[in-house]
Amino acid sequence: MSQKQSKSAGKQLLHLVFGGELTDLDAVQFKDLDKLDIVGIYPNYAEAEKAWKSAAQRSVDNAQMRYFVVHMHRLMEPEPHPDEDDE
């Protein structure tokens, strides 16, 4: 089983981790959409959070670089899932 595959028999709760350089620290608007860093898609929040922390740490010297975790499963199925333990 690969690192990105779910280790549980439950439903995958997909999360996207991405980041980019912001135009302003007070808004979420990216300087260059062509330079967004798509870190990956993960089967649960815990794995996405690890990837987010790693990516954020790599860019710690750039104050305008921000990384985000997007709860893709919430966009795909807006109803709450009973196995969801992400926050």
Image: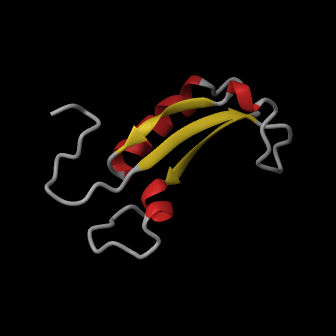
Q: Quadrant of residue 35?
A: top right
Please name the residue shown 53% across and 51% down the image: 70
Tell me residue 80's x, y (percent). 39, 75
Please name the residue shown 42% across and 64% down the image: 87
Tell me residue 81's x, y (percent). 33, 72
Decide which of 62, 33 is in the foreground and name it: 33
How many numbered marks, from 0 up? 0
- Relative placement, left or right, of 61 versus 13 is right
- Relative placement, left or right, of 73 versus 5 is right
- Relative placement, left or right, of 20 versus 43 is right
Q: In which quarter of the image is the N terminus?
A: top left
Please name the residue shown 24% across and 59% down the image: 11
Please name the residue shown 34% across and 51% down the image: 44
Tell me residue 10's x, y (percent). 19, 60
Decide which of 24, 10 is in the foreground and name it: 10
The extreme front residue here reads 76
Q: Up-down: is 84 above or below 22?
A: below
Tell me residue 26's x, y (percent). 83, 50
